[in-house]
Amino acid sequence: MCALAGTRIRAASLNPESLVKFVDRLPIPPLARSLGLRTVRGNAAVQAPYYRITLREIHAKLHRDLAPARLWTYDGSMPGPTFQMRRGEGALIEWVNALPTHHFLPIDHRLHGAESDKPEVRTVVHVHGAKAATGDDGYPENWCAPGKSATAYYPNQQDAAMLWYHDHAMGITRLNIYAGLFGLYILRDEVEDTLNLPRGDYEIPLAICDRQVTRDGQLEYPASGKPDAPWVPEVFGEAFLVNGKLFPFVEVEPRKYRFRIFNVCNGRFLNLFLSGQAVMRQIGTDQGLLPAPIEVERLLLAPGERADIVVDFAYFAGHEILLHDSSFDLMQIRVGKQRRSDDSSVAPATLRPFARIPESSAVRTRELSLMEETNMVAEPMKMLLNGAHWDMPVTEKPVLDSVEIWSFINATDDTHPIHLHLVRFQILDRRRFDAFDYQSTGKVRYTGPVEPPSPSEAGWKDTVRADSKMVTRIIVKFEGYLGRYVWHCHVLEHEDNEMMRPYEIVPA
């Protein structure tokens, strides 16, 4: 289920299997620390904790036996510092661009927003899944160059959830995230507090991404080989990093642990499972807790998707367990023989109440196509949302506080993870259709039954897998703020090449 899996990409110079596995301890990103209170702009009566995060280049080893790699980071860490936020307690974050003025990965100046008259290095931070005003959301054109900074206010007026932050600069998002610009943003609330889930040392973030690495330990972005046209339609790497390390290990006690997992791959869909018949209990998805835990043998995550799981290692004392993606080893889990203290945490039978949005409440249904545009003369190939390019007039203008159904009609051969900024939504269903007939006539002719979302998707989402030759329907309440936001495919090579569109929330 990888995007454009048939396209060949040249192999990485490094064969990861040549490395000794499980010699590096899993890094745990540091916590972001507030520098005190600051006044929220435009509202002298409101103060919020202030954070100053610097984007800068570092050199750090991806594996014990490799030379230090050139990486771009938030505050010198890949992943960046983890933000621990409380519902209702807003935060001011100043994002300071102290990166070099020249990019070390190949820019394609043919892509919209990446033209040669713009600075090579540009950044704008998007907190993926956050409910923030349009000026603070990380609009792709609101970038700043090295030597500049931008301050954003995040109200944190939403349910507890595992969000993440990353670069979103127009035309080079794929390069900046590949270089290391991503981190975790965790929201907590009183409902979650009462559940007595594993916490503290027993809650572990796992940022998983695939990269290509040279034999001397450097990141290698697999460009096309054409100096003036380096864009490729997707990137798959042979080296899997977990929290920035190749084949790390983590030591755990024989008790319950909570893992906050997010897929930071440019284009790869993760298919995760544990060895030794260890059971994963999924308790949450993109936008927070599920109604009840579900047992999953395998965890499928598209780029941008997250999962919140609990694993009880009580029955594995003294043993080793591996976390795999399909046939790849990702991480070793070493279970100790003893606990430091009694384990009072639980994975309760019920988590957070969940009410379905009635389809009858929708004031509009939008049919939105996912299509390819190929021009044998003018490269590169483009993938378009509803047949429109980025700079065409906005066509999706939902009314504030209204409910709409968006139907993604995917006539391509690829699964596209579609992300809507600002809002959360529920998945209604998927249904197979005749894609050839649709491309010929513009009419949807269904060829299969309605398929409900999987149990692991039966909660609040902000990213949905729009499967190939399927119509995927979501229902959304457009609440929070007026203004312009974006929706896009989260395969980053697609996003950077026109598979992103603005939408605008308008007053009634």
Image: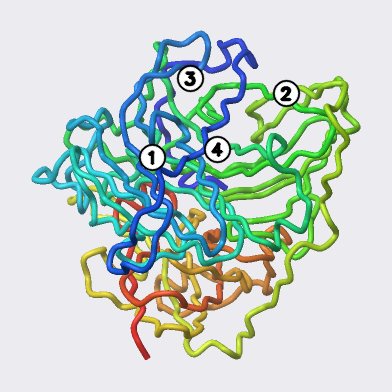
Please indicate whether residue 334 sits to the left or right of residue 339 in the image: left
Task: Say what amino acid the circle numbered 3 marks.
Answer: Leu
Q: Are marks 1 and 2 in contact (CB under 8 Å)?
A: no
Q: Secondary structure at mark 2?
A: strand
Q: Of label 4 and label 1, which has the lower sequence position?
A: 1
Tell me the CA gap for discs 4 and 3: 14 Å
Tell me the CA gap for discs 1 and 2: 28 Å
Q: Which residue is mark 3?
A: 62
User: Neighbour class for label 3 at 10 Å: few (<14), some, many (≥20)?
Assistant: many
The circle on residue 177 is 1
Residue 227 pos. (x, y %): 19, 31
Q: Of label 2 and label 4, which has the lower sequence position?
A: 4
Taking the spot 52% from the left edge, 33% from the top edge, the residue there is 30
Task: Say what amino acid the circle numbered 2 marks.
Answer: Glu
Q: Of label 1 and label 2, which has the lower sequence position?
A: 1
The circle on residue 207 is 4
User: Neighbour class for label 1 at 10 Å: few (<14), some, many (≥20)?
Assistant: many
Q: Of label 4 and label 3, which has the lower sequence position?
A: 3
Please indicate whether residue 95 sits to the left or right of residue 251 in the image: left
Q: Is residue 404 above or below residue 243?
A: below
Q: Nearer the viewer, mark 1 or mark 2?
A: 2
Tell me the CA gap for discs 4 and 1: 12 Å
User: Neighbour class for label 4 at 10 Å: few (<14), some, many (≥20)?
Assistant: many
Q: Secondary structure at mark 3?
A: loop
Q: Is residue 36 above or below residue 339?
A: below
Q: Which residue is mark 2?
A: 251
